[in-house]
Image (cartoon, rainbow, N blue to C red):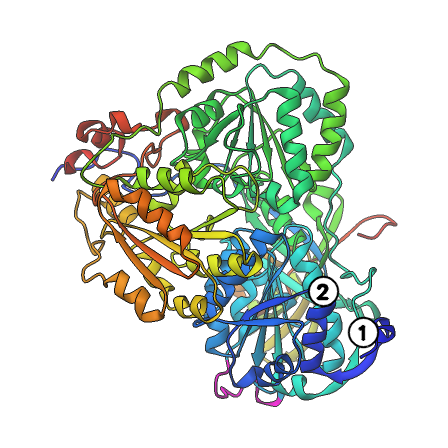
Amino acid sequence: MDKQTNEQPASAYFIEERHDPNETHTLSVLVQNEPGVLARVIGLFSGRGYNIESLTVSETERNKHMSRITIVTTGTPMVIQQIKNQLDRMVPVYRVVDMTLTGHSIERELAMVKVRSKGDARVEALRLADAFRARVIDATTESFVFELTGNTDKISQFEALMKPLGLVEVARTGVAAITRGADGM
Amino acid sequence: MSETKKTESRQMTGAAMVVQALKDHGIQHIFGYPGGAVLPIYDEIFQQDTVQHILVRHEQGAGHAAEGYARSTGKPGVALVTSGPGATNMVTALTDALMDSIPLICITGQVPTHLIGNDAFQECDTVGITRPCTKHNWLVRDVNDLAKILHEAFYVATTGRPGPVVVDIPKDVQFATGTYHPPRKNDVHVSYAPRVKGDAAQIRKAAALLASAKRPVIYSGGGVINSGAEATRLLRELVGATNFPITSTLMGLGAYPASGKNWLGMLGMHGTYEANMAMHDCDVMLCVGARFDDRVTGRPDAFSPNSKKIHIDIDPSSINKNIRVDVPIIGDVAHVLADLLDILKADAKRPDLKPWWAQIAKWRARNSLAFKKNDDVILPQYAIQRLYEQTRHLDTYITTEVGQHQMWAAQFYGFEQPNRWMTSGGLGTMGYGFPAAIGVQVAHPDSLVVDIAGDASIQMMLQEMSTAVQFNLPVKIFILNNQYMGMVRQWQQLLHGNRLSNSYSEALPDFVKLAEAYGGVGMQVTKPGDLDGAIEEMIKVKKPVLVDCHVATLENCFPMIPSGKAHNEMLLPAEANDEATAAAFAGGKALV
């Protein structure tokens, strides 16, 4: 049989490769804190093939049963818009704000970093931690646990620096974001 | 119970609340199947006669029947099933309703609250399983939440972009006594407020584009029908006021009459040549309540390359999902069209459309739905044409299954009114049509309801014959029997070297005997000359009738946009010889 020379294999669907560049966006989603609401949001992402880079969720207004979900996602501009629209039409979702588009939001993440080392490496770890304004929240004679807050890049950088100095493990909260200025979302 | 008590809150069991809520929302018919976890609700149904329960033979049938009921009436359809398998059998119908935006309220029983998570008998995670296939769903943990949730369920299902909802009620909640309150006008969900009114600035932009269009086309969809009678009226008024050509998706058929002079026929993969060419060559496209589905657009990067696109949709997530549009308008079709018409009617100066209509006339002259007459075997297109001619003047509703027969029905049956055509568009559910027809017949007991079916599809839900017989529903099943899963066979022929892998319906049952075994009437017709008589007889019999219409076995459904091709690369029936077909289909060349 001849080799197929056509771009499109025999298919009932148009098979196309997309070449638009991906962007990373941080979305704040205000939701009604009802059972299963997180599963709904996550299910939307997995079901429609969207990416989740980071996700944090917590009840923020207890008396109104409202939770705030912060999602960092990547996709083409069309996909990002689609993600926002899909989130916005969910019944328990109040509002979706694209923190990346608003341009002036603050993003923070908290990490706890465990480092095991002795001698010079231990001193260097402590010195770098100081430079990054990380706090020591646990120590033994051969280890530290550092607590560090900052944006994702800062934490990743700190993590990379600790690697040769005896990095054991890292726990990160994922990103929380808020807009600057007096107004809420 | 006295009338004065109607607006007051009062104590009752959860099971009684379900029936009371149905009454309060004006529900007269529900479709369901009993089981252990819904017995308290069935007990309540037994003790009243306002809400009539239609017993189906499979829960999926209940879902599709409720869908047919909803689509033919514009009212929500209601299904009631038990936990576990009852709920999982509903999944196909729920997904179908989600894809086609059908308001469907499904009440499921659940094992008692204290057994949830214990792998109890007939337990399943209903809200987990149905989360991605409903617009919203609820597990009711407290009987005092039930009334609010039931009213919310009706509100969510029927407003905005309609869709299916599930209310999962554990058996102990059905038994428990709590406070019921009737639906209240301001009883809306706190975080859910669909927008109906379109943005005025966007509508002005759209009006300006339309007013300057030299080659306009209106592409309407199921959203027009979902929006209601007013939307249909306004769409027709828009076409009348502008003289724009109009095409429609599969789901939108009937919003504009097929006999209307501006009608181009359906568009898309099996749409007419003139509709697809007009879409491809237009300069301004007005998409009304449709969603640029892949069966409609063909190759997306070659879809209508030179047009400005206006998109009216109530669901923001439909905007720019597949095709980038220039003027999105988020809102209800009727509201937006009313505003749009106000502007368009005030300014009657518009470019001359004569050259555009002349071009369309040339495309129409290609006669893309033509088929050769045959005196020996019944051609499926001819069968639909005869069915149309003999039922068009009657009060007729048509449902279909999925496949070639569905496309032929869409091509050859002309719909003059909305809500007369129920078909599974988005999900493409074989087995949809017959239970849907039962739902339609329940809503319209004196109308003629015909399920145009295929020999393969009909076997997926044929057990509902028993339902039709039990409830004296004189639905008609009109099978285009070609002894194949025709659409699968067509794709195998065109794309997979004619290797007909598992698409031949071996060991077909004797449909006539089967119909008779259920207590219905079975008929068989094999010759073109006998067709009219058979259809006449089918209409005359006031019982469920199955017509086994033997048609040409290897007929293909044309015209067709081959996969990976654009609207202007259609394959027309007259040109669909082996060579042209091979050339048109990617990968097909080596295989013919």
| Between discs 2 and 1, the one toward the N terminus | 2
**Foreground residue among B168 and A128:** B168
Residue B473 versus residue B579 in the image, above or below: below
Q: Residue at x 63, y 24 (%)?
A: B240
Say whether residue B151 is left or right of residue B463: right
Give the magenta range: B114-123
Q: Position of residue A19 (x, y in %)?
A: 45, 36
Q: Position of residue B404 (x, y in %)?
A: 33, 45
| In the image, farthest residue toward the left | A1
Which secondary structure is most common in the magenta stretch?
loop
**Foreground residue among B323 and B390:** B390
Residue A168 in sight from this viewpoint: no
Q: Residue at x 85, y 48 (%)?
A: A181
Residue B446 falls inside the magenta stretch: no
Residue B433 versus residue A136 in the image, above or below: above
Crowd tier of the residue under label 1, counting other residues whose Cα lies within 10 Å: few below 14, some 14–19, many 20 or above:
many
Residue A61 versus residue B415 in the image, above or below: below
The residue to which callout 1 is attached is B181
Contact check, label 2 and label 1, Cβ < 8 Å: no
Say whether residue B436 is left or right of residue B199: left
> Disc 2 residue type?
His
Name the quarter where the C terminus of chain B is drawn. top left
Name the quarter where the N terminus of chain B is drawn. bottom right
- For label 2, the SS is loop
Which chain is home to disc 2? B
Which quadrant of the structure image shows residue B19?
bottom right
The residue to which callout 2 is attached is B25
Name the mark on residue B589: none
